[in-house]
């Protein structure tokens, strides 16, 4: 497993440990001590939307295009989440019920999949909010993840920029991605990301092509990037697809992460 996906695995395992430790504490602590601390609460979709309304897209054609694109991205996420063909196990931790799989497509595009279980079905909403909140990644590795919203379409559909490092002394990389949250059913939520054709004025001139969601290549947009990007100081990467399927069960929450990031082997 390369360093980038190790970080993702640790991210997921940190959520797992956090949620399960809270469940255990609730079981053994007095009732009055089981009340959640408000300081640990993540923002809801609506609260995140209100904080970023100044970034609201008002172009109806663009909104229509990205809405359709992310519905397609959801279909791809569902397919990879349940599909077993071509996926090979490359590590697991039965103690934490965490399993890792890797697939290499004919065009040599890599797709990784991580499945894990969180104890306690009451952690369903909290887990979704943690995965959706753009500020949440900072609480795990402040040196490795910096995520911000740069455009808003609705409370459940945004365009983000994410910067990350593989280590404290590693070089900083970044990507842009559309991110959407879907209520698939009463007890299932999906969060999916994919990168369209983003012109951020990076002088490298390197062209990226989404090899999983081909229609993502048809959506083109400009963004107002920072000076370090315009000066070519950061390495740009690309999200073919990345996302989570979160399912509430009787006594637990099952989560499947699917990720295919162009350039991840250089992390």
Image: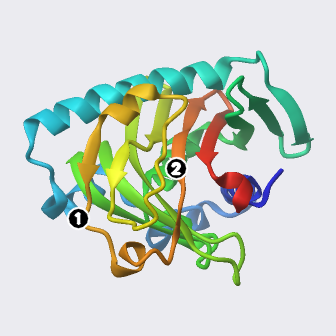
Dot 2 corresponds to which residue? 238
Expressed as whole percent of the image width and height from the top left, the position of residue 41 reads 45, 64
Mark 2, other Cα within 10 Å: few <14 / some 14–19 / many ≥20: many
Which of 106/98 is in front? Answer: 106
Q: Is residue 44 visible?
A: no
- 112 w.r.t. 42: above or below: above
**Would residue 251 appear left or right of 193 to someone viewing this image?**
right
The quarter of the displayed image where residue 19 is located: bottom right
Tell me which residue sits at (48%, 44%) in the image: 125
> Which of disc 2 and disc 1 is earlier in sequence?
1
Mark pair 1, 2: CA separation: 26 Å
Verify CB contact (< 8 Å) between mark 1 and mark 2: no
**Would residue 130 appear left or right of 225 to someone viewing this image?**
right
Expressed as whole percent of the image width and height from the top left, the position of residue 14 reads 70, 60
Mark 1, secondary structure of its residue: helix
Which of 172/79 is in front? Answer: 172
**Would residue 249 appear left or right of 97 to someone viewing this image?**
left
Residue 51 image label? 1
């Amino acid at each position: 497993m390369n360093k980038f996906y190790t970080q993702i695995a640790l991210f997921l395992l940190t959520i797992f440990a956090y949620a399960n430790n809270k469940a255990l504490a609730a079981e053994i602590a007095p009732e009055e001590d089981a009340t959640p601390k408000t300081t640990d609460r993540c923002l809801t979709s609506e609260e995140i939307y209100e904080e970023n309304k100044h970034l609201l897209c008002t172009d109806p054609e663009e909104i229509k295009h990205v809405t359709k694109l992310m519905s397609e991205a959801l279909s791809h996420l569902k397919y990879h989440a349940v599909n077993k063909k071509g996926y090979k196990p490359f590590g697991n931790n039965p103690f934490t019920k965490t399993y890792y799989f890797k697939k290499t497509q004919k065009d040599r595009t890599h797709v990784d999949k991580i499945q894990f279980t969180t104890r306690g079905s009451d952690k369903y909403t909290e887990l979704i909010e943690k995965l959706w909140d753009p500020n949440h990644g900072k609480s795990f590795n402040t040196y490795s993840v910096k995520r911000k919203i740069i455009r808003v379409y609705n409370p459940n559909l945004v365009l983000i920029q994410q910067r990350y490092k593989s280590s404290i002394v590693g070089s900083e990389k970044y990507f842009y991605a559309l991110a959407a949250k879907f209520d698939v059913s009463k007890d299932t939520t999906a969060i999916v990301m994919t990168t369209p054709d983003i012109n951020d004025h990076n002088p490298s001139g390197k062209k990226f092509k989404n090899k999983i969601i081909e229609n993502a290549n048809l959506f083109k947009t400009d963004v107002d990037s920072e000076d370090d990007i315009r000066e070519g100081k950061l390495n740009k990467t690309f999200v073919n697809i990345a996302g989570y399927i979160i399912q509430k069960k009787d006594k637990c929450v099952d989560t499947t992460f699917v990720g295919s990031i162009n350039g991840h082997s250089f992390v």
